[in-house]
Every structure is written in structure tokens, then in C-alpha cells.
Amino acid sequence: MGTAERRGAPRASGARLTGHRDPGATDRDMSEGAAEPLGRERGVPVREAGHDTHEQYYRPLWVEEPARRRRLPDPVRTAAVRAVLLIAVTLMQAMVAFLCTMAGSWLAFPMVISSVVSTIAATWGALDVWVTRQVWNQRNGVVSVPSSTARALRRERRRARRQERVAERGQERIRRRGGAGQLSHS
């Protein structure tokens, strides 16, 4: 099967082949009669063009695929955006400093100095992303290691909730028995 058939070129029978097939399949795996109109594959209604003998098939503009990786947590994403902006500004300053130096402009020296400062800030921004990610993982228990702080915090919270429930049940029992929380009737 050639590229024209895979792209949806009309066949001799008047039907069109769609480009959808198994991603692992090769050209030899797909026989010429195996192509089915896209509308029928996906359950999308097939529109017919008046009295023509050949059908037109609805092809979506894109097919949504599930994300391969989960979205970054908000604090980490914020730090990453900040780092990207700092790095972009640093690169622009370095380029301007280079061009000013080549042109012999008086602005070359201040731009070189500001580029050095921006390089330090960009390095800090990149380290900030790494530190923020590590802190978020440690606090939210993503790292599954015995030394994880988050695991100990969760354990303490569960223990405190259990104690609260036990205390509430004790108070409920006392109220049901008609006592006002007194231990003796003196």
C-alpha cells in the first residue's frame, strides 16, 4: 500500500481509505480491503453527498491522546516558569552584550555586567525549580521511602483522628446514659 492510499486518496471502487490503523502495523499488515470508513470506525455518522455514488467521511481534525506524564504541581510549575523567563532574559542580555562589544558601543560594559548578574539569577531560578520539586515531593508523600517526612506526618494525623473519634464515642456513651459527664453521684 502506498502513501496515496494511506492519505485517503480515492480508490477504484470510489471509497476512501482512512489513515487510521494500528500504530504497530506495517504496510504489509493492512490489506487493501481492510480499510473501513472513519465514520463507521468511530461511530460518527457518515454524511452522504446528495445523489453522488461516492460517500464523504467525517475525519476529525485531531485525536486526543491521554497525557503521558502527569501535570506538574502548581508551586513547581510556577518556579519552572520563573526559571524559563530568567534564562530567556539572560540569553537576550548576553546576545545584546556580545553585539554591543562587536560594535564597540559604550553599552557593552554595562550589558556584560548585567549579563553576569542575570546568569547568577538564572542559576538560582533553575536550582529553585529543583528545590521546590523536592520539597513538594517530601511534603506530599510522592517519594515512597521509609525516611519520607510525609509518611510520618500522615501517620500522626491518623493517630490524632483516631483518638478524637474514641473521645467522641466516650462522650456519646455518657450522654446516652443520661449522665452529665459526672463520674460519681455525689
Image: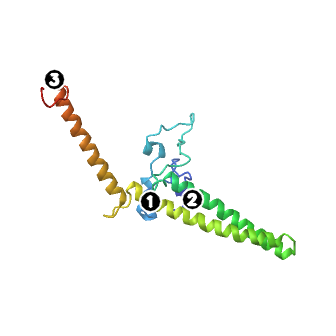
Q: Residue at x 28, y 46 (%)?
A: 160
Residue that carries the numbered disc 2 in the rendered image: 80
Residue 137 visible from this viewpoint: yes
Say which quarter of the image contains residue 88. bottom right
Give the amino acid at mark 3.
Answer: Gly
Q: CA distance from mark 3 to mark 1?
A: 72 Å
128, above or below 42, in the image? below
Q: Secondary structure at mark 1?
A: loop
Residue 41 in the image, given as x and y percentages of width and height: 43, 45
Q: CA distance from mark 3 to mark 2?
A: 61 Å
Disc ID at residue 23: 1
Q: Residue at x 17, y 29 (%)?
A: 182
Residue 46 in the image, given as x and y percentages of width and height: 49, 38
- Nearer the N terminus, badge 3 or badge 2? 2
Q: Residue at x 55, y 61 (%)?
A: 3
129, above or below 116, in the image? above
89, above or below 159, in the image? below
The crowding category of the residue bearing disc 3, from other C-alpha atoms within 10 Å (few below 14, some 14 to 19, many at least 20), is: few
Give the amino acid at mark 2.
Answer: Ala
Disc ID at residue 178: 3
- Nearer the N terminus, badge 3 or badge 1? 1
